[in-house]
Amino acid sequence: MQLNLIKQSWEEVYPKLQSINPELAKIVVTLKLNPQHKVFTVRLPFGTQVFREGELNPLLVHEDLIPIGMVLHNQLELYLGGKRPLPFWVLKPGDILGGSQLINQYFQGDYQPAFCWDVTSGLRSVFLLAKINNATRLNKLYRHYQSLERMNMDNEGLHWQLFRNLMLAEQNPWYSELLFFSKAWFSHIDNPAWNPFYLFIIGEAMKKLAFVRDNLRWQYIFSQLHEQKFARYSEYVMSTVKHLFALGSSALPGFAPISDDAAMPLARLQQIFHDLYQLEYQPIFMGAVSPNVRRQHLYYSLQYPALIDSAPRLSRISNAEVLEQIIHIASRCFNYFKDPYYARVLPMLHRFATEGAFEYYHHLAKPQGMIHNVYELFARDAQFSAASACSELGLPVNASFLKGCIKITPIPSVLEAARIIKSGDTGA
Protein backbone atom coordinates (compact mmCIF):
# COMPACT_ATOMS: atom_id res chain seq x y z
CA MET A 1 0.00 0.00 0.00
CA GLN A 2 1.27 3.48 -0.90
CA LEU A 3 0.43 6.52 1.21
CA ASN A 4 0.98 9.87 -0.44
CA LEU A 5 2.15 12.53 2.02
CA ILE A 6 1.59 15.97 0.51
CA LYS A 7 3.66 18.84 1.88
CA GLN A 8 1.69 22.08 1.77
CA SER A 9 1.86 25.67 2.91
CA TRP A 10 -0.36 26.85 5.73
CA GLU A 11 -2.28 29.10 3.35
CA GLU A 12 -3.34 26.09 1.27
CA VAL A 13 -5.05 24.30 4.16
CA TYR A 14 -6.30 27.32 6.13
CA PRO A 15 -9.77 27.52 4.50
CA LYS A 16 -10.52 23.91 5.43
CA LEU A 17 -9.19 24.34 8.96
CA GLN A 18 -11.30 27.45 9.44
CA SER A 19 -14.44 25.47 8.66
CA ILE A 20 -13.72 22.47 10.93
CA ASN A 21 -11.74 24.02 13.80
CA PRO A 22 -12.28 27.80 13.82
CA GLU A 23 -10.81 28.14 17.32
CA LEU A 24 -7.42 26.80 16.22
CA ALA A 25 -7.60 28.80 12.97
CA LYS A 26 -8.15 31.98 14.99
CA ILE A 27 -5.05 31.22 17.07
CA VAL A 28 -2.85 30.46 14.08
CA VAL A 29 -3.55 33.78 12.33
CA THR A 30 -1.96 35.55 15.32
CA LEU A 31 1.34 33.67 14.89
CA LYS A 32 4.30 34.87 12.88
CA LEU A 33 4.69 32.12 10.33
CA ASN A 34 7.39 31.75 7.71
CA PRO A 35 7.82 29.39 4.73
CA GLN A 36 9.26 26.73 7.08
CA HIS A 37 5.89 26.27 8.79
CA LYS A 38 4.64 23.59 6.43
CA VAL A 39 1.99 20.94 7.03
CA PHE A 40 1.55 17.44 5.62
CA THR A 41 -1.77 16.02 4.50
CA VAL A 42 -2.47 12.38 3.72
CA ARG A 43 -5.52 10.36 2.66
CA LEU A 44 -5.85 7.00 4.39
CA PRO A 45 -7.90 4.06 3.05
CA PHE A 46 -10.25 2.30 5.45
CA GLY A 47 -8.39 0.17 7.99
CA THR A 48 -4.99 1.82 7.52
CA GLN A 49 -2.95 1.65 10.73
CA VAL A 50 -1.79 5.19 11.56
CA PHE A 51 -0.21 4.40 14.95
CA ARG A 52 0.62 1.03 16.49
CA GLU A 53 1.44 1.22 20.21
CA GLY A 54 2.34 4.86 19.70
CA GLU A 55 4.66 4.28 16.75
CA LEU A 56 3.78 6.12 13.54
CA ASN A 57 3.21 3.97 10.46
CA PRO A 58 6.61 3.81 8.65
CA LEU A 59 4.86 4.86 5.43
CA LEU A 60 4.03 8.19 7.11
CA VAL A 61 7.50 8.89 8.51
CA HIS A 62 9.21 12.00 7.11
CA GLU A 63 12.28 13.79 8.45
CA ASP A 64 10.35 17.06 8.79
CA LEU A 65 7.08 15.61 10.17
CA ILE A 66 5.99 15.67 13.81
CA PRO A 67 3.30 13.03 14.62
CA ILE A 68 0.90 15.64 15.98
CA GLY A 69 -1.97 16.64 13.76
CA MET A 70 -5.65 17.00 13.12
CA VAL A 71 -8.45 15.09 11.41
CA LEU A 72 -9.63 16.78 8.22
CA HIS A 73 -12.14 14.29 6.79
CA ASN A 74 -14.16 11.32 8.04
CA GLN A 75 -13.32 9.50 11.26
CA LEU A 76 -10.49 7.54 12.88
CA GLU A 77 -10.50 5.43 16.03
CA LEU A 78 -8.04 5.67 18.90
CA TYR A 79 -7.94 2.48 20.95
CA LEU A 80 -5.85 0.21 23.15
CA GLY A 81 -4.66 -2.72 21.06
CA GLY A 82 -4.55 -6.34 22.15
CA LYS A 83 -6.52 -9.54 21.71
CA ARG A 84 -9.73 -7.56 22.13
CA PRO A 85 -9.09 -3.87 21.27
CA LEU A 86 -10.66 -1.39 23.69
CA PRO A 87 -12.12 1.72 22.02
CA PHE A 88 -11.04 4.95 23.71
CA TRP A 89 -12.06 7.76 21.35
CA VAL A 90 -13.55 8.21 17.88
CA LEU A 91 -11.78 11.13 16.23
CA LYS A 92 -13.83 13.43 13.98
CA PRO A 93 -12.92 16.36 11.71
CA GLY A 94 -11.30 19.09 13.79
CA ASP A 95 -10.07 16.72 16.51
CA ILE A 96 -6.38 16.87 17.47
CA LEU A 97 -4.33 13.67 17.31
CA GLY A 98 -1.13 12.99 19.26
CA GLY A 99 -1.28 16.14 21.37
CA SER A 100 -0.31 14.32 24.58
CA GLN A 101 3.23 14.02 23.17
CA LEU A 102 3.64 17.78 23.55
CA ILE A 103 2.96 17.86 27.31
CA ASN A 104 6.43 16.76 28.45
CA GLN A 105 8.20 18.97 25.92
CA TYR A 106 6.21 22.07 26.87
CA PHE A 107 6.43 21.61 30.63
CA GLN A 108 9.97 20.15 30.51
CA GLY A 109 9.38 17.06 32.61
CA ASP A 110 8.07 13.49 32.60
CA TYR A 111 4.48 14.38 33.38
CA GLN A 112 2.80 12.30 30.71
CA PRO A 113 3.56 8.65 29.79
CA ALA A 114 4.61 7.97 26.22
CA PHE A 115 1.84 7.92 23.62
CA CYS A 116 1.03 4.18 23.39
CA TRP A 117 -2.32 4.12 21.59
CA ASP A 118 -3.28 2.47 18.33
CA VAL A 119 -5.08 4.55 15.70
CA THR A 120 -6.75 3.34 12.49
CA SER A 121 -8.48 5.04 9.60
CA GLY A 122 -12.19 4.52 10.10
CA LEU A 123 -13.60 2.45 12.93
CA ARG A 124 -11.59 -0.47 14.31
CA SER A 125 -14.26 -1.51 16.82
CA VAL A 126 -17.00 -2.48 14.37
CA PHE A 127 -18.90 -5.67 13.52
CA LEU A 128 -22.09 -6.94 11.94
CA LEU A 129 -24.82 -7.87 14.40
CA ALA A 130 -25.70 -10.94 12.33
CA LYS A 131 -23.32 -13.87 12.15
CA ILE A 132 -21.29 -14.16 8.94
CA ASN A 133 -19.73 -17.59 9.48
CA ASN A 134 -21.73 -19.53 6.87
CA ALA A 135 -19.10 -21.38 4.78
CA THR A 136 -21.20 -21.48 1.60
CA ARG A 137 -21.88 -17.76 1.69
CA LEU A 138 -18.27 -16.91 2.59
CA ASN A 139 -17.11 -18.91 -0.43
CA LYS A 140 -19.15 -16.57 -2.63
CA LEU A 141 -17.03 -13.70 -1.31
CA TYR A 142 -13.80 -15.64 -1.79
CA ARG A 143 -14.70 -16.49 -5.38
CA HIS A 144 -15.58 -12.88 -6.16
CA TYR A 145 -12.50 -11.46 -4.42
CA GLN A 146 -9.88 -14.06 -5.23
CA SER A 147 -7.15 -12.25 -3.31
CA LEU A 148 -9.21 -12.28 -0.12
CA GLU A 149 -7.62 -14.03 2.85
CA ARG A 150 -9.71 -16.89 4.22
CA MET A 151 -10.53 -16.52 7.91
CA ASN A 152 -12.55 -18.31 10.57
CA MET A 153 -15.47 -15.95 11.01
CA ASP A 154 -16.86 -17.66 14.12
CA ASN A 155 -15.17 -14.86 16.05
CA GLU A 156 -16.96 -11.50 15.68
CA GLY A 157 -13.67 -9.86 16.61
CA LEU A 158 -12.42 -10.75 13.12
CA HIS A 159 -15.23 -8.91 11.32
CA TRP A 160 -13.17 -5.73 11.02
CA GLN A 161 -10.32 -7.60 9.34
CA LEU A 162 -12.72 -8.97 6.75
CA PHE A 163 -14.25 -5.52 6.16
CA ARG A 164 -10.78 -4.01 5.72
CA ASN A 165 -9.64 -6.78 3.37
CA LEU A 166 -12.78 -6.44 1.25
CA MET A 167 -12.22 -2.71 0.83
CA LEU A 168 -8.54 -3.22 -0.03
CA ALA A 169 -9.41 -5.96 -2.53
CA GLU A 170 -11.66 -3.66 -4.52
CA GLN A 171 -9.60 -0.51 -3.87
CA ASN A 172 -12.61 1.23 -2.40
CA PRO A 173 -12.34 5.03 -2.60
CA TRP A 174 -13.36 5.69 1.04
CA TYR A 175 -10.70 7.55 2.99
CA SER A 176 -10.05 9.58 6.08
CA GLU A 177 -7.69 12.54 5.88
CA LEU A 178 -5.12 13.75 8.39
CA LEU A 179 -3.02 16.87 8.69
CA PHE A 180 0.39 16.66 10.41
CA PHE A 181 2.53 19.62 11.44
CA SER A 182 6.16 20.06 10.44
CA LYS A 183 8.96 20.45 13.00
CA ALA A 184 9.02 24.24 12.62
CA TRP A 185 5.68 24.48 14.44
CA PHE A 186 7.25 23.07 17.61
CA SER A 187 10.49 25.07 17.62
CA HIS A 188 9.03 28.03 19.56
CA ILE A 189 8.46 26.46 22.99
CA ASP A 190 10.30 29.37 24.67
CA ASN A 191 8.38 32.05 22.76
CA PRO A 192 5.37 33.29 24.80
CA ALA A 193 3.62 34.40 21.60
CA TRP A 194 3.22 30.71 20.71
CA ASN A 195 1.71 29.71 24.07
CA PRO A 196 -1.92 29.84 22.83
CA PHE A 197 -1.08 27.37 20.05
CA TYR A 198 0.72 24.89 22.30
CA LEU A 199 -1.78 25.18 25.13
CA PHE A 200 -4.67 24.60 22.72
CA ILE A 201 -3.13 21.32 21.53
CA ILE A 202 -2.31 20.24 25.10
CA GLY A 203 -5.81 21.21 26.25
CA GLU A 204 -7.44 19.07 23.56
CA ALA A 205 -5.30 16.10 24.63
CA MET A 206 -6.14 16.62 28.30
CA LYS A 207 -9.88 16.66 27.54
CA LYS A 208 -9.64 13.23 25.92
CA LEU A 209 -7.59 11.96 28.87
CA ALA A 210 -10.13 13.22 31.43
CA PHE A 211 -11.32 9.73 32.38
CA VAL A 212 -7.73 8.48 32.69
CA ARG A 213 -6.93 11.40 35.01
CA ASP A 214 -10.08 10.85 37.07
CA ASN A 215 -9.81 7.06 37.13
CA LEU A 216 -8.26 7.01 40.61
CA ARG A 217 -11.35 8.82 41.89
CA TRP A 218 -13.66 6.42 40.04
CA GLN A 219 -11.70 3.46 41.42
CA TYR A 220 -11.90 4.75 44.96
CA ILE A 221 -15.63 5.47 44.84
CA PHE A 222 -16.55 2.07 43.41
CA SER A 223 -14.09 0.11 45.55
CA GLN A 224 -15.62 1.73 48.63
CA LEU A 225 -19.11 0.83 47.46
CA HIS A 226 -17.97 -2.71 46.69
CA GLU A 227 -16.46 -3.14 50.12
CA GLN A 228 -19.23 -1.48 52.14
CA LYS A 229 -22.42 -2.21 50.15
CA PHE A 230 -21.87 -4.98 47.60
CA ALA A 231 -19.20 -7.27 49.06
CA ARG A 232 -21.04 -10.42 48.02
CA TYR A 233 -20.73 -9.55 44.32
CA SER A 234 -17.65 -10.32 42.21
CA GLU A 235 -15.08 -7.74 41.20
CA TYR A 236 -16.00 -8.45 37.57
CA VAL A 237 -19.63 -7.44 38.12
CA MET A 238 -18.61 -4.33 40.07
CA SER A 239 -16.14 -3.31 37.33
CA THR A 240 -18.90 -3.73 34.75
CA VAL A 241 -21.22 -1.44 36.75
CA LYS A 242 -18.45 1.16 37.00
CA HIS A 243 -17.89 0.97 33.24
CA LEU A 244 -21.61 1.40 32.54
CA PHE A 245 -21.73 4.53 34.69
CA ALA A 246 -18.63 5.84 32.85
CA LEU A 247 -20.45 5.32 29.55
CA GLY A 248 -23.51 7.10 30.89
CA SER A 249 -21.35 9.97 32.16
CA SER A 250 -19.97 10.50 28.61
CA ALA A 251 -16.47 9.53 29.78
CA LEU A 252 -15.91 6.66 27.31
CA PRO A 253 -17.29 5.51 23.94
CA GLY A 254 -19.97 2.86 23.72
CA PHE A 255 -21.43 0.93 20.78
CA ALA A 256 -24.30 2.04 18.56
CA PRO A 257 -25.68 1.22 15.09
CA ILE A 258 -23.71 2.94 12.33
CA SER A 259 -25.92 4.84 9.91
CA ASP A 260 -23.63 6.80 7.56
CA ASP A 261 -20.28 6.64 5.77
CA ALA A 262 -18.35 9.00 8.06
CA ALA A 263 -16.95 6.16 10.16
CA MET A 264 -16.55 3.50 7.47
CA PRO A 265 -17.61 2.66 3.88
CA LEU A 266 -20.96 1.54 5.26
CA ALA A 267 -23.13 1.67 2.14
CA ARG A 268 -20.69 -0.43 0.11
CA LEU A 269 -20.22 -3.06 2.83
CA GLN A 270 -23.97 -3.35 3.31
CA GLN A 271 -24.31 -3.89 -0.43
CA ILE A 272 -21.64 -6.60 -0.42
CA PHE A 273 -23.21 -8.55 2.43
CA HIS A 274 -26.70 -8.21 0.96
CA ASP A 275 -25.90 -8.91 -2.70
CA LEU A 276 -22.82 -11.18 -2.63
CA TYR A 277 -22.87 -12.87 0.76
CA GLN A 278 -26.71 -12.90 0.67
CA LEU A 279 -27.11 -12.25 4.38
CA GLU A 280 -30.43 -13.52 5.75
CA TYR A 281 -30.85 -10.59 8.13
CA GLN A 282 -30.65 -6.82 7.95
CA PRO A 283 -26.96 -5.83 7.62
CA ILE A 284 -26.77 -3.70 10.76
CA PHE A 285 -23.24 -2.67 11.72
CA MET A 286 -22.42 -1.84 15.35
CA GLY A 287 -19.45 0.42 15.99
CA ALA A 288 -17.75 2.55 18.62
CA VAL A 289 -19.34 5.98 19.13
CA SER A 290 -17.81 8.76 21.21
CA PRO A 291 -19.97 10.84 23.57
CA ASN A 292 -22.03 13.51 21.81
CA VAL A 293 -24.62 16.16 22.55
CA ARG A 294 -27.54 14.30 20.99
CA ARG A 295 -27.78 11.83 23.90
CA GLN A 296 -27.44 9.06 21.35
CA HIS A 297 -28.29 5.72 22.94
CA LEU A 298 -25.18 3.61 23.55
CA TYR A 299 -24.93 -0.13 24.09
CA TYR A 300 -22.73 -2.44 26.09
CA SER A 301 -22.72 -6.23 25.76
CA LEU A 302 -21.67 -8.80 28.33
CA GLN A 303 -20.60 -10.92 25.34
CA TYR A 304 -18.01 -8.30 24.37
CA PRO A 305 -16.47 -6.99 27.59
CA ALA A 306 -14.62 -3.73 26.98
CA LEU A 307 -13.50 -3.16 30.55
CA ILE A 308 -10.27 -1.24 31.06
CA ASP A 309 -9.70 -2.96 34.42
CA SER A 310 -11.43 -6.07 35.71
CA ALA A 311 -10.91 -9.41 37.40
CA PRO A 312 -11.71 -12.49 35.27
CA ARG A 313 -15.35 -13.40 35.00
CA LEU A 314 -16.54 -16.58 36.70
CA SER A 315 -17.40 -18.99 33.88
CA ARG A 316 -20.25 -20.69 35.76
CA ILE A 317 -22.44 -17.59 35.89
CA SER A 318 -24.77 -16.87 32.95
CA ASN A 319 -25.36 -13.52 31.28
CA ALA A 320 -28.92 -13.46 32.60
CA GLU A 321 -27.60 -13.89 36.15
CA VAL A 322 -25.00 -11.16 35.63
CA LEU A 323 -27.74 -8.84 34.34
CA GLU A 324 -29.80 -9.46 37.45
CA GLN A 325 -26.82 -8.61 39.65
CA ILE A 326 -26.06 -5.46 37.63
CA ILE A 327 -29.69 -4.34 37.93
CA HIS A 328 -29.59 -4.70 41.71
CA ILE A 329 -26.29 -2.81 42.10
CA ALA A 330 -27.02 -0.12 39.50
CA SER A 331 -30.46 0.74 40.89
CA ARG A 332 -28.92 1.40 44.29
CA CYS A 333 -25.98 3.29 42.78
CA PHE A 334 -28.38 5.64 40.98
CA ASN A 335 -29.75 6.60 44.39
CA TYR A 336 -26.31 6.95 45.98
CA PHE A 337 -24.92 9.17 43.23
CA LYS A 338 -27.82 11.60 43.46
CA ASP A 339 -26.38 12.74 46.79
CA PRO A 340 -25.00 16.33 46.58
CA TYR A 341 -21.61 14.98 47.69
CA TYR A 342 -21.08 13.45 44.24
CA ALA A 343 -21.99 16.74 42.56
CA ARG A 344 -18.71 18.04 44.03
CA VAL A 345 -16.58 14.90 43.65
CA LEU A 346 -17.61 13.67 40.17
CA PRO A 347 -20.16 16.11 38.68
CA MET A 348 -20.75 14.09 35.50
CA LEU A 349 -21.50 10.95 37.51
CA HIS A 350 -23.96 12.89 39.66
CA ARG A 351 -25.62 14.35 36.58
CA PHE A 352 -26.00 10.94 34.96
CA ALA A 353 -27.57 9.55 38.14
CA THR A 354 -30.22 12.29 37.97
CA GLU A 355 -30.79 12.43 34.20
CA GLY A 356 -29.61 9.15 32.62
CA ALA A 357 -30.90 5.60 32.50
CA PHE A 358 -30.10 1.95 31.79
CA GLU A 359 -32.33 -0.59 30.08
CA TYR A 360 -31.55 -4.31 30.06
CA TYR A 361 -32.07 -6.81 27.22
CA HIS A 362 -31.61 -10.51 26.59
CA HIS A 363 -32.71 -12.56 23.60
CA LEU A 364 -34.37 -15.18 25.86
CA ALA A 365 -36.09 -12.74 28.19
CA LYS A 366 -39.83 -13.02 28.78
CA PRO A 367 -41.88 -9.79 28.70
CA GLN A 368 -41.72 -9.22 32.45
CA GLY A 369 -39.41 -7.72 35.04
CA MET A 370 -36.58 -5.32 34.17
CA ILE A 371 -34.92 -7.52 31.53
CA HIS A 372 -36.63 -6.99 28.17
CA ASN A 373 -36.68 -9.11 25.05
CA VAL A 374 -34.52 -7.81 22.19
CA TYR A 375 -37.58 -7.35 19.97
CA GLU A 376 -38.44 -4.41 22.22
CA LEU A 377 -34.95 -2.99 21.74
CA PHE A 378 -35.39 -2.78 17.97
CA ALA A 379 -38.86 -1.29 18.39
CA ARG A 380 -37.77 1.35 20.91
CA ASP A 381 -34.60 2.64 19.24
CA ALA A 382 -34.93 4.27 15.81
CA GLN A 383 -31.15 4.06 15.38
CA PHE A 384 -31.54 0.46 14.23
CA SER A 385 -34.01 1.23 11.45
CA ALA A 386 -31.82 4.17 10.35
CA ALA A 387 -28.80 1.84 10.19
CA SER A 388 -30.49 -0.80 8.03
CA ALA A 389 -30.44 -0.64 4.24
CA CYS A 390 -32.65 -3.71 3.77
CA SER A 391 -35.79 -3.39 5.87
CA GLU A 392 -37.44 -6.29 4.01
CA LEU A 393 -35.07 -8.72 5.76
CA GLY A 394 -35.49 -10.06 9.27
CA LEU A 395 -33.93 -8.52 12.36
CA PRO A 396 -30.81 -10.23 13.78
CA VAL A 397 -32.52 -10.92 17.12
CA ASN A 398 -30.24 -13.88 17.91
CA ALA A 399 -27.05 -11.83 17.58
CA SER A 400 -24.41 -12.71 20.17
CA PHE A 401 -24.11 -9.04 21.11
CA LEU A 402 -27.73 -9.05 22.31
CA LYS A 403 -27.33 -12.02 24.66
CA GLY A 404 -27.01 -9.81 27.70
CA CYS A 405 -27.08 -6.20 26.54
CA ILE A 406 -27.44 -2.88 28.35
CA LYS A 407 -28.84 0.23 26.66
CA ILE A 408 -27.46 3.47 28.08
CA THR A 409 -29.11 6.86 27.78
CA PRO A 410 -26.12 9.08 28.55
CA ILE A 411 -25.93 12.71 29.51
CA PRO A 412 -24.89 15.10 26.72
CA SER A 413 -21.14 15.39 26.29
CA VAL A 414 -19.87 18.68 27.74
CA LEU A 415 -16.76 18.50 25.53
CA GLU A 416 -18.81 18.00 22.38
CA ALA A 417 -21.18 20.81 23.34
CA ALA A 418 -18.25 23.19 23.84
CA ARG A 419 -16.81 22.22 20.47
CA ILE A 420 -20.08 22.88 18.67
CA ILE A 421 -20.61 26.23 20.40
CA LYS A 422 -17.10 27.35 19.42
CA SER A 423 -17.48 26.21 15.82
CA GLY A 424 -20.98 27.66 15.46
CA ASP A 425 -22.23 24.31 14.10
CA THR A 426 -25.58 23.88 15.81
CA GLY A 427 -26.65 21.06 13.53
CA ALA A 428 -29.55 23.12 12.21
Image (cartoon, rainbow, N blue to C red):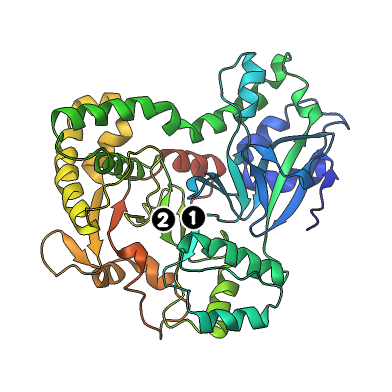
Amino acid carrying label 2: it is Phe
Extreme-left residue of the structure: 368
Mark linked to residue 255: 2
Extreme-front residue of the structure: 316
Up-down relation of residue 222 to residue 297 (above or below): above
Q: In the rendered view of the protein, which quadrant contains the N terminus?
A: bottom right
Residue at point 36% right, 25% down?
216
Residue at point 48% right, 59% down?
157
Name the side, left or right, on which 231 lies relative to 422.
Answer: left
| Circles 1 and 2: CB atoms closer than 8 Å | no
The foreground one among 165 and 94 is 165
Q: How far across and how far down the image is residue 383, in percent?
A: 39, 66
Q: How far across and how far down the image is residue 209, in percent?
A: 49, 32
Residue at point 32% right, 48% down?
410
Extreme-right residue of the structure: 35
Label 1: which residue? Answer: 427
Q: How far across and how far down the image is residue 106, in percent?
A: 65, 18
Q: Is residue 122 visible?
A: yes
Q: Earlier in the sequence, mark 1 or mark 2?
A: 2
Q: Is residue 172 visible?
A: no
Name the side, left or right, on which 312 lies relative to 288.
Answer: left
Query: Within 10 angstroms of label 1, few (less than 14), some, or many (20 or more) residues?
Result: few
What secondary structure is found at the residue carrying circle 1? loop
Name the side, left or right, on which 78 lies relative to 380.
Answer: right
Which of the 4 image quarters holds residue 372?
bottom left
Name the side, left or right, on which 31 lies relative to 84.
Answer: right
Up-down relation of residue 369 to residue 32 (above or below): below
Mark linked to residue 138: none
Query: Within 10 angstroms of label 2, few (less than 14), some, or many (20 or more) residues?
Result: many
Q: How far across and how far down the image is residue 246, in percent?
A: 34, 40
Amino acid carrying label 1: it is Gly
